[in-house]
Amino acid sequence: MRLSKTDQPIIEIQDVSKYFESNQKKLQALDQIDLSVEAGEFLSLIGPSGCGKSTLIRIMGDLLKPSSGIVRINGKIAKQARLDRDYGIVFQTPTLFDWWKVARNVELPLKVMGYPKAEWMDLVRDKLKLVGLQDFENVYPWQLSSGMQHRVAIARALVTQPCILFMDEPFGALDEITREQLNLELLNIQYETNVSVIFVTHSVPEAVFLSTRVVVLSDRPGTIKNIIPVDLPHPRTDKTRESPPFFDLVTEIRAVLKA
Ligand code: ADP
Ligand code: MG
């Protein structure tokens, strides 16, 4: 795992606003977002549909430019951080190539980034082991369950050993049992790699279970309504979900969302 520079926030967003223009209409998606994330955090973004969560994650990932404001990722401008592969991104659908075996899907970022071929197999095997798929490198994605396909997507996002993982509603389409299992695995992955995670979700309990802090966004244009620290003990387990402080936090965040 590459280390981040520890003396500064791993992500700094200052006064970021975003406007889209379509059919001569100007639509404001984000309004003056200020956010600072420390290395090793698990930060969730939650808010009404269309409030700009994906836009914010895309701006951090240099897939979109902000209309105004500053974004620094690992101390660099977002574009440089992208070129340096300081982060991996996981979207709601795993977007795997069905006609490529699992190992080939996972090694794709290494190929794109021009890593020496001799290193590919070790890195791929290491990450497949991390997500519990060490025995599946030679099968095709369509032979896997949807939960396993998501784990392949996580392995692929981590194969270049980034210090940040952006996840945009990664488990939103999964059934509850699979989702809770992946939540536990994701925390374990973070524990083992120390990767910082920015996680978009619609689920308040999921946000509370996973996070060190939960950022609640307002209706569009998205502004930060509140940032709630989650001081539940680690490691989080199935028991965490049954504890009174867990329910208190879920209730508190629901209230902020509705306010
Ligand atoms: P969320 O992820 O919170 O559901 P998005 O970030 O996807 O919301 O979108 C925020 C708002 O910006 C929405 O109103 C959406 O329609 C609009 N939007 C997003 N991307 C574009 C785009 N490329 N062009 C025009 N409007 C967009
Ligand atoms: Mg979205």
Image (cartoon, rainbow, N blue to C red):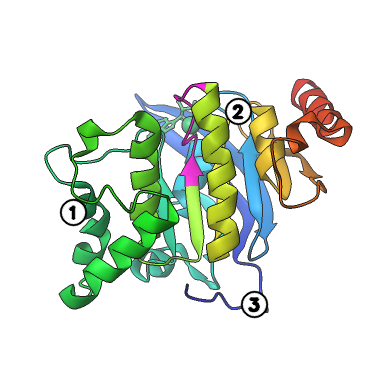
Question: Which amino acid type is marked by label 2?
Answer: Arg
The quadrant in which residue 47 appears is top right
The quadrant in which residue 9 appears is bottom right
Question: Which amino acid type is marked by label 1?
Answer: Arg
The quadrant in which residue 106 appears is bottom left
How many marks can you see? 3
Proximity of marks 3 and 2: CB atoms separated by less than 8 Å: no
Q: Earlier in the sequence, mark 2 or mark 1?
A: 1
Front one among 178 and 45: 178
Q: Is the residue marked 2 within 8 Å of ligand 1, measured from its CB? A: yes
Q: Is residue 79 visible?
A: yes
Question: Which amino acid type is marked by label 3?
Answer: Thr
Q: Which residue is mark 2?
A: 220
The residue shown at (28%, 38%) is 95
Q: Which residue is mark 1?
A: 104
Number of the label disc, if any, that sits on residue 240: none
* Picture layout, residue 160 above or below residue 259: below
Residue 86: x %, y % from top left? 44, 67
Please state if 58 lies on the left or on the right of 98 as rendered: right
Residue sitting farthest toward the front = 135
Eye-nearest disc, 2 or 1: 1
Q: Earlier in the sequence, mark 1 or mark 3?
A: 3
* Element assignment for label 2: loop
Which segment is the magenta one?
167-175
- Mark 3 is surrounded, within 10 Å at the Cα level, by few (under 14), some (14 to 19) or many (20 or more) other residues, namely few
Distance from disc 3 to disc 2, alpha carbons, whole Å, reads: 34 Å
Most common secondary structure along the magenta stretch:
loop
The residue shown at (53%, 46%) is 185
The residue shown at (61%, 32%) is 221
